[in-house]
Image (cartoon, rainbow, N blue to C red):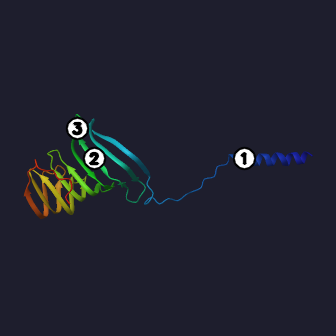
Amino acid sequence: MGRIVYIVLMVIALVACKDEMTSVVKHPTDPEKVPTMTSHDVQTVISDDGRTRYRIETDVWQMFEEAKEPHWIFPRGVKAEELDPAFNPISSIKCDSAYYDENSQIWDLHGHVNITNSDGDVILTDQLFWNQMTHRLYSDAFIHIEKQGRVIEGYGYESNEQFSTYTLRQVEAIFPVDESRFRSTDPR
């Protein structure tokens, strides 16, 4: 009888120990396809030198921090505004989707790219690259520029971040515009 009690106690002890054990199942994920983090309905501000300078809004922000080339994707577009000290927008960038390469610090803005600078100049295109390291914007796509009472259209664009100095490689049209009559929102 003592032996049976001993066996029963051993079985109970083994069952009790088994409940305490934790199993870890590895589930492989591809860091090139699965984001490290996905955020929805993002509204954030960015400060520089102790002052709020930028506001960013996006429906979806995916970060691929573990990818071979770390990057962010904004598949449903992004809107970024530069703010004055009273938090009023000075300039803005909007697009249908965006891709940011962390290593090269290059933004690739796609679809209905709309940029307005502090002087009220407007740039409309379907694709624009912004290199944060060189502080340059460029594109080979069709571009529509409304600047100082005239419209300039063409292909192949490069400028500084303030749009004060720019080059349009293949100019298609330049014409004066009576801004009191209309303000274009789409180059097509």
Does residue 183 appear left or right of residue 53 in this picture? left
Q: Earlier in the sequence, mark 3 or mark 2?
A: 2
Residue ID at (7%, 58%): 175
Q: Is residue 92 above or below residue 67?
A: above
Residue ID at (23%, 53%): 114
- The amino acid marked with disc number 2 is Ala
Q: Earlier in the sequence, mark 3 or mark 1?
A: 1
The answer to which image quadrant residue 49 occupies is top left
Depth order, front residue of 35/151: 151
Tag nearer the camera, 1 or 2: 2
The answer to whether the residues at label 3 and label 2 have Cβ atoms under 8 Å apart is no
Task: List x then y, in percent, for residue 12.
Answer: 79, 46
Depth order, front residue of 164/79: 79
Q: State the residue position of label 1.
A: 17
| Gap between marks 3 and 1 measured at Cα | 63 Å
| Gap between marks 3 and 2 measured at Cα | 12 Å
Q: Earlier in the sequence, mark 1 or mark 2?
A: 1
The quadrant of the image that shows the C terminus is bottom left
* Neighbourhood count class around disc 2 (C-alpha, 10 Å): few under 14, some 14–19, many 20 upward: many
The answer to whether the residues at label 1 and label 2 have Cβ atoms under 8 Å apart is no
Q: State the residue position of label 2.
A: 80
Q: State the residue position of label 3.
A: 88
Residue ID at (15%, 55%): 145
